[in-house]
Structure formats: C-alpha cells, structure tokens
Amino acid sequence: MSQVKIFADSTCDLPHDWIKAHDIGIIPLYVTFGDQNYRDGVDLTTPELYAKVEQTGSLPKTAAPSPSDFIAAFTPFVEEGRDIVYISLSSELSSTYQNALIAGEEFPEGRITVVDSRNLTTGIGLLVMKAVAAAEQGKSAREIAGIVETVKPLVETEFVIDSLEYLYKGGRCSGMQNLMSSLLKIRPVIKVIDGKMTPAYKVRGKREKALEQMVNNTLDKKDEMDNDLIFVTHSMAAEDAEAIKRLLEQKTGAREVALSDAGCVISSHCGAKTIGIIYSKKA
C-alpha cells in the first residue's frame, strides 16, 4: 500500500473501476433540486439528473463539499499514518479548492497537500492518474504534487456542447444567444483556459460537423501529445464517444484511449450529448 493516498472530487469523472483499482478517494460535490441535496455520483446518477430536469423544468444548483466533508474523508487515512494529496476542481469554477485548504489546516503540517487542477472533468482525471502512478512508485506527497504542477498547464480540454440550453438555464449565456444558437444550429466549442470554461469557437450546422472539427483539432496536435492516455468524456452520448475513441486509437498511437461518463455536476452545466477530448501535451 502506498504511503500517500490520492484524493480527487467527483468532477474528475474517472471510470469507477479505475477509482476502485487504484484506491482513489473521491469527495462528492452536491447537486440540489429545491430543498433536496444529492451527492454527485452517490445519491444521484447522470440519467437521474436529466430525468429530474425534465420533470421540474429547471436546472439544479451545484455546491462544493464543505471543509467538514473533507475533514471526515481525510481523517481515517491520516490516522493510519498516510499523507494525502488532493487534486481539486479548478478554483475558478468552485470553492472546492478553498474548502479543502481550510480542512487541511486542521491536520498536522505537511499531512495534507492540496493541488488546484485548474481544470475540470477528466482534465482533472489525467492529473489524478499521474499522481496515482507516482504514489504507486513510492514517491512522497511533495514529489507527487510537483509532478502534478508540472503536467497541469499541459492538459488540453476541449468539448462540444450540443445546445446552449443548459448554459442558458444556468445563467451562463443570454436568452438571445440561446435563441440565435438554436435558430442557426450553432454548436459552441468550449476549451478550458486559465482554469475557466472559455468559448473557443462555434461551428454552424450539424452536430457531426462540430465533432469532426474537434477531432481534427486534436489530430493536428498529435505530434505534441503525451501519448500515454487520452480521454473521450461524454454526457449521454456513448455511441458518438465510442466512434471518436476508435478513430483516436487508429490515428494517434496512444497507449490508451479511455471512455468516461460525465457526472452530475459537469452534466448539469453542459447538458446531454456533450462530448470532450482531453489529453496532455509532452512535458
């Protein structure tokens, strides 16, 4: 057993079998419908989320874990003598990182190391898997955090949103933008830049055209890739994600192209049929 326990939060969207196989601790964020709170991936699944949105006609709110949530999760491992490296959702998108720092102050100095991923979904997941590999090699918490800090500016996260409806309902775009996007069949493509979700470009026409553009953008950078791992992450778009996975396997020579399902928090902001490609450039 590694002397360093790796933690992430539910927005890392790693496959469940990977989490179990590598003993990764997961802190769930919260999804709230009315006065009912659900732990992302524990009390509520993505299909159930969309069913509730359909029933209520409104989007849920999302919230960070509290400092006490982190303390409760970290304490058993600290008590058994293990150090912890926690890799958080981008501090630009949530107070999750700040709450983890607050929790860390309740433990002896050096026992809890908190790293801001400056990313979301499997952009975090890539960093977590780098940390896991380092922990399994016996590296210290400080060494692991250093590896993650080196890799995180190299992570490329780009995804196609099928509709602006969820961004509109969540207050992230105007009603006019939503209307014009629907009328003109504009597919927005989002990138994570400086820790924020940033509109990168728009593709007019069929969804397939936007997905093809995203794939081509990825393939244009294949010589710059760290070909260890590429994620294709999706929200209720398994068929298209599988087709993109097969294409990337053929064209990139990556050791592994992995499929990942977006959890409730990510899905509540982006909506169904969102698909992203996430990889790291070479160091």
Image (spheres, helix red, strand yellow):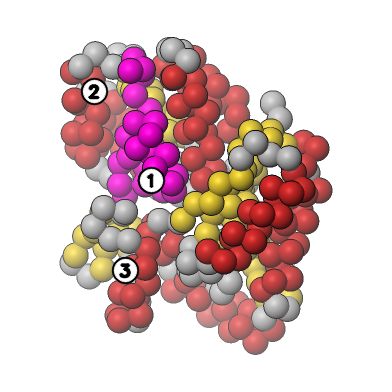
* Disc on res. 16: 1
Query: What is the x, y in percent for residue 185?
Result: 67, 81
Write the residue at 21% across / 60% down. Answer: 37
* Disc on res. 77: 2
Write the residue at 47% across / 15% down. Answer: 137
Residue 153 seen in render = no
Sooner in the amino-acid sequence: mark 2 or mark 3? 3
Closest to the observer: 221 or 108? Answer: 221
In which quadrant of the rendered image does the C terminus lie?
top right
- Left-right relation of 110 to 237: left
Write the residue at 60% across / 77% down. Answer: 177
Under circle 3, the secondary element is: helix
Residue that carries the numbered disc 3 in the rendered image:
48
Q: How far is the residue under mark 2 from the one under mark 1?
A: 21 Å
Q: What residue type is labelled 3?
A: Glu
Sooner in the amino-acid sequence: mark 1 or mark 3? 1
The magenta region covers 1-29
Mark 1 packing: few (<14 Cα in 10 Å), some, or many (20+)?
few
Quadrant in the picture for residue 222 = top right
